[in-house]
Amino acid sequence: MTNNIINLESELKKQKTINYLIGEIIKYATNLEPLDDSMEKMVDMLMGILGLSTITIKFNESVNDKTYCRSIENGGVTSVCSCGNENSNLEPMKVQVSENESTIMVPLIDHKTNNNIGYVFAKSNNSEFFDSSILSFFEILAIQIPIIVSNALLYEKMKYASIKDILTNSFNRKHLNRTLFKIAKENIPTSLAFFDLDNFKFVNDTFGHSFGDRILLDVSEIALSYCTKNNGELFRYGGDEFIMLFYESSLEKAKDILEELRTDIMIHLSSNLELDIKQTISIGLSSYPETVSDPEELLDAADSALISGKLKQKNKLYIGYEKNTGGQN
């Protein structure tokens, strides 16, 4: 009788633990947060509450090709571990038992597409750990994790969309402000180019805004390609104004990149617009720490150089300095 009571109490305690875990996992499934955050919390929780010796959640390339893991080695917990056969995620859920341990491998299936997205692997130092109640829990876990993945990917898309300019696919002004704040806070050596399209109002007024949008899209595509090649980012500041940031880039290197860009845009647009117009850009360039001693001065220095330079001659690149240096454009 005593043994039956003890077994019943143990079973009730286990079921209470499982119910708690299911509740927490459902919370993750209803949240919108980065996948890394959800999975790191997930493996910590499963490891700690279930008392496993290893827990691994592995995703394939269709998700993020990452592994989230906790494992006990030499008395400590590590986040680096290996498990089983990489192809085991193609098989049904299975349990393997030996004298001193037991393991489970559970495939993760996206039930919207019926595609495999990875697997869960768990190991216990108890050979009898994976009983019917624990197996039921892992079946629920295998259903909930793909839901968490789906919500996390939706979160990333929403986050990405919130910092993008719809027309040009460049970053928007809001994200520029955050980026400049980070550059200033972390003192990141950066060259900043501020450019706009010469005589763009005339183009819009003469040929219409849809034609103007086409030009903006062409210009942004070319500028984005230069950013991709040169550790840079493109931002639409407003209208026909764009900002290019080149990280860890010297003034001279940035000048070479931008002179090539300026020529490339002039040649490309003149040959593709099918109209007798010559579309050019003018550029203001500043560089921290070469032309400004404070990264917070980057934007103003480049903007001032662009404004004053265009009064002299368009379709050129001008260097901007902070006001107290006496530098020349």
Image (cartoon, rainbow, N blue to C red):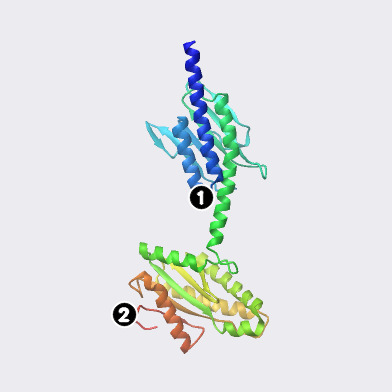
Disc tally is 2
| Residue occupied by mark 2 | 324
Residue found 46% across the figure and 74% down from its top = 193
Residue at far bottom of view: 312
**What is the quadrant of residue 290 in the picture?**
bottom left
Q: Quadrant of the C terminus?
A: bottom left
For mark 2, does the 10 Å Cα neighbourhood hold few (<14), some (14 to 19), or many (20 or more) residues? Answer: few
Which mark is first along the chain, 2 or 1?
A: 1
Q: Residue 195: tell me if it is visible.
A: yes
- Which of the numbered marks, if any, corresponds to residue 184? none
Q: Could you say where residue 99 lies in the image, as x and y percent from the top left?
A: 49, 20
Looking at the image, which is closer to me, 189 or 324?
324
Residue found 60% across the figure and 72% down from its top = 217
Compared to 257, does 328 lie above or below? below
What is the three-letter code of the residue carrying label 2?
Asn
Looking at the image, which is closer to me, 12 or 77?
12
Q: Residue 61: tell me if it is visible.
A: no
What whole-number distance in Å separates the C-alpha atoms at marks 1 and 2? Answer: 44 Å
> Going by the image, does 271 lie left or right of 260?
right
> Going by the image, does 144 lie left or right of 312?
right
- Which of the numbered marks, if any, corresponds to residue 34? 1
What is the three-letter code of the residue carrying label 1?
Pro
Q: Could you say where residue 270 lies in the image, as x and y percent from the top left?
A: 62, 81
Q: Could you say where residue 276 lies in the image, as x and y percent from the top left?
A: 65, 86
Q: Could you say where residue 152 lies in the image, as x and y percent from the top left?
A: 55, 49
